[in-house]
Amino acid sequence: MEYKDKNGLTEKEFLAQYSPGDYPRPSVTVDMMVLGPKKDYSGLKILLIKRGAHPFINCWALPGGFVHEDESCYEAAARELKEETGLKNVFLEQVYTFSKPNRDPRTRVMSVAYMALSPVAPPVRGGDDALEAAWFDFEFTDNMLRIFNDDIGVEIVYQLSTKRFQNGNVRYANTVAAQKSKSQLAFDHDEIIVESMIKLRREIEYTDLPFSMANKEFTLPDLQVIYELLLGHSLYKANFRIMVADRIEPVGKKEKSIVGRRMSELYRLK
Amino acid sequence: MEYKDKNGLTEKEFLAQYSPGDYPRPSVTVDMMVLGPKKDYSGLKILLIKRGAHPFINCWALPGGFVHEDESCYEAAARELKEETGLKNVFLEQVYTFSKPNRDPRTRVMSVAYMALSPVAPPVRGGDDALEAAWFDFEFTDNMLRIFNDDIGVEIVYQLSTKRFQNGNVRYANTVAAQKSKSQLAFDHDEIIVESMIKLRREIEYTDLPFSMANKEFTLPDLQVIYELLLGHSLYKANFRIMVADRIEPVGKKEKSIVGRRMSELYRLK
DNA sequence: ATAATAGTGTCTATCAGACATTATCTG
DNA sequence: CAGATAATGTCTGATAGACACTATTAT
């Protein structure tokens, strides 16, 4: 058990004398695609931060920050998310690690991308703070990524197209974004959004992920709209209900009567 | 376009004077699960490296190494793979980034995990080199991960079980490994293998990934065996052929006659 | 009653899973 | 032709997709 190395040291002795070498070490950040529904479920919102420093000064960027020494990437993402929005205990999942040597013009910075899905899009600090944050309308179709906020007059548009790649002896298609508006997202944050959306839509097939954007108690019409917003296409009501039937249970209450006519049942996730 | 920051600098001026701050920066490595078929397709092999230094001295570990300053993680993984095995242009894909602060007892080291699938398991340097490498038999079932090499008398076994997690308001199950043999894998490499296999099996559903373990020209019985090895269960021949029918095209040759009776057609990926 | 949305019934084409049969090769 | 593997045929039950219908509420 107590092996010694070529210098005659045990593991304990080795670790006591170890000092990290002078390998060049990259900075590591987490960046997050944070999505929440509009209050009336008429669309999705994405959280962006306005950069106040070079590079990409005055560009909008995904929220994120450096990973501290004593925390995992997940913990860093959860911390940043809470600092920015107050949100905690929301769905938060690693997507991909972006590491092209020149993705940040300052120095070597790798970014571990996360996606977060929240049942709400709570107010964020806006106006003339040092760090300006805002929720933007978010549209992701087959050939277009459109992020805009009419209140502050910003529109960021990317055209999406598929490009063929080869990996081993297998070819496959990948989605790439091309800037179409005057404004752009900072760094490679367009790529982060594209990868996150692809992963998100794939995971909807075999997880309960859309439930994380619903309230604890929800109506089936609302849940269906969330599915439709995330998937980007509409669903047949009857088929949708069959699909989720064995994952939900009725609460026994009905929603508070709105302007509408018939009241819908409230359900919760089993 | 030419915005200046709070110090009155343009982006160009800012970058010229920029020096990376003294944030603590982690070391970043890539680690790879490299799988190849046995020559007779009777099983899978995994490539491991014997550690010659603390920590985990004399333990077997996934191949990998530090990401250099001028390369992406993908490039680092491809370089390490070629150095170790001579393999290039094989299927290579990022799996997950492991970042628990204490996953390496020396210092902060994050690992970006990759998986590689090769059509062959070429000889590697073994014996008494400083860096000893070897292919191990690889078995991954619902409840067991078993890695062994009878030539060198090593067996590493983990029991697999499912543990429930919560993410946002969604619960889901995850696979965890518990060491069952005297020998173990170094670091959290058991977790890396588990995550890689889960991702691999999921991706078989919607990609041509198993073709990357077949030769350019292959017979359908061979391709089916590869599918079965990767998925971990057997398939019905007729159903399998229907499933892959529209992705393959006949070469017009038959395989060189082996001991068997009828010769099978050769196909290639469309 | 009417308008509007909530919720259910049911048909069909497709497909995964299962098993049975035919075809082709060697000795 | 006997033995072995390659390749194809076909039945069945489940299910995704589509559309039509009934139910419940406020005014």
Image: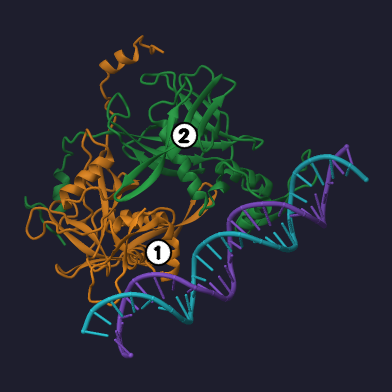
Chain colours: A green, B orange, C cyan, D purple
Q: Is residue A4 left or right of residue A156?
A: left
B165, above or below B235, in the image: above
Q: Is residue B130 left or right of residue B204?
A: left
State the count of labels.
Answer: 2
Q: Residue B138 at what x, y percent from top left?
A: 27, 64
Q: Which quadrant would residue A222 be assigned to in this image?
A: top right
Write down the residue under mark 1: B161
Q: Residue B100 at what x, y percent from top left?
A: 33, 46
Front one among A125 and B149: B149
Neighbours of disc 2 within 10 Å: few (<14), some (14-19), many (20+): many
Neighbours of disc 1 within 10 Å: few (<14), some (14-19), many (20+): some
Residue found 23% across the figure and 54% down from its top: B62
Q: Residue A95 at what x, y percent from top left?
A: 41, 43
Front one among C19 and B93: C19
Write down the residue under mark 2: A160
Mark 1 on the same chain as mark 2: no
What is the secondary structure assignment of the residue under circle 1? strand
In three-dimensional space, the C-alpha distance between marks 1 and 2, rounded to whole angstroms, equals 41 Å
Q: Is residue B108 among what the camera can see?
A: no
Q: Which quadrant would residue A138 be assigned to in this image?
A: top right
